[in-house]
Amino acid sequence: MATASNTRTTPQKMHPMASILFGSRWLQLPLYLGLIVAQGVYVFHFMVELVHLVQKVPDMHEADIMLIVLGLIDVVMISNLLIMVIVGGYETFVSRLNLKGHPDEPDWLSHVNANLLKVKLATAIIGISSIHLLKTFINAPNLDDKTMLWQTVIHMAFVLSAVSIAWIDRLMTHAEDKH
């Protein structure tokens, strides 16, 4: 007697065109692998900057240390963004990772979808932009007003975009709940 938990359904035979279209999602695999390489580049960059900070710290002013540390935080945030895109995008658009029960499974991965991924990415971009803007303000004496103005405007555009994306996601989720 088979139970629902150990019964497997066999996939239906798909039309050849449907098989090609559905299989085309695997063309994204090299893109995600390339992002993993980019992640390695950011790890290398982080280590170079960290060594630079440690070697130069006796001769540095506090503002210079802060700028380098903010740069390190920026690299970490971009790296987090890469992980969200790699893992979330692969899980959403290519194939399931089957991590249920794995102790390191990220909480957000269990309910990731394209809309949630967009909101998370927009939020991460705001964080990265905030770090850049903070670096700009710390370095303000060395910059002109026009640069600071445009960076602030660009940051606010990111914030407005993220709020818009989250609002649209909420409207869509609310509309789906009614159906």
Image (spheres, rainbow, N blue to C red):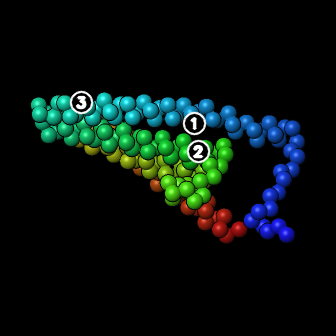
Q: Nearer the viewer, residue 126 or 62?
A: 62
Q: Position of residue 156 (x, y in %)?
A: 38, 47
User: In this image, 124 relative to 166: left or right?
Assistant: left
Q: Position of residue 32 (x, y in %)?
A: 57, 36
The Cα atoms of the two marked residues, 3 and 1, are separated by 30 Å
Neighbours of disc 3 within 10 Å: few (<14), some (14-19), many (20+): few
- Mark 2 or mark 3, which is nearer to you? 3
User: In this image, 76 relative to 58: left or right?
Assistant: right
Residue receiving disc 1: 32
Quarter of the view holding residue 29: top right
Residue at 24 percent across and 30 percent down: it is 52
Q: Amino acid at mark 1?
A: Tyr
Residue 58 appears in the rendering = yes
Residue receiving disc 2: 89
Q: Secondary structure at mark 3?
A: helix
Residue at 11 percent across and 31 percent down: it is 59
Q: Secondary structure at mark 1?
A: helix
From the viewer's perspective, is residue 176 above or below residue 128? below
For residue 52, the mark is 3
Quarter of the view holding residue 147: top left
Q: Amino acid at mark 3?
A: His
From the viewer's perspective, is residue 166 above or below residue 33? below
Q: Secondary structure at mark 2?
A: helix
Residue 149 appears in the rendering = no
Q: Earlier in the sequence, mark 3 or mark 1?
A: 1
Q: Are marks 3 and 1 in contact (CB under 8 Å)?
A: no
Q: Are marks 1 and 2 in contact (CB under 8 Å)?
A: yes
Q: Amino acid at mark 2?
A: Gly
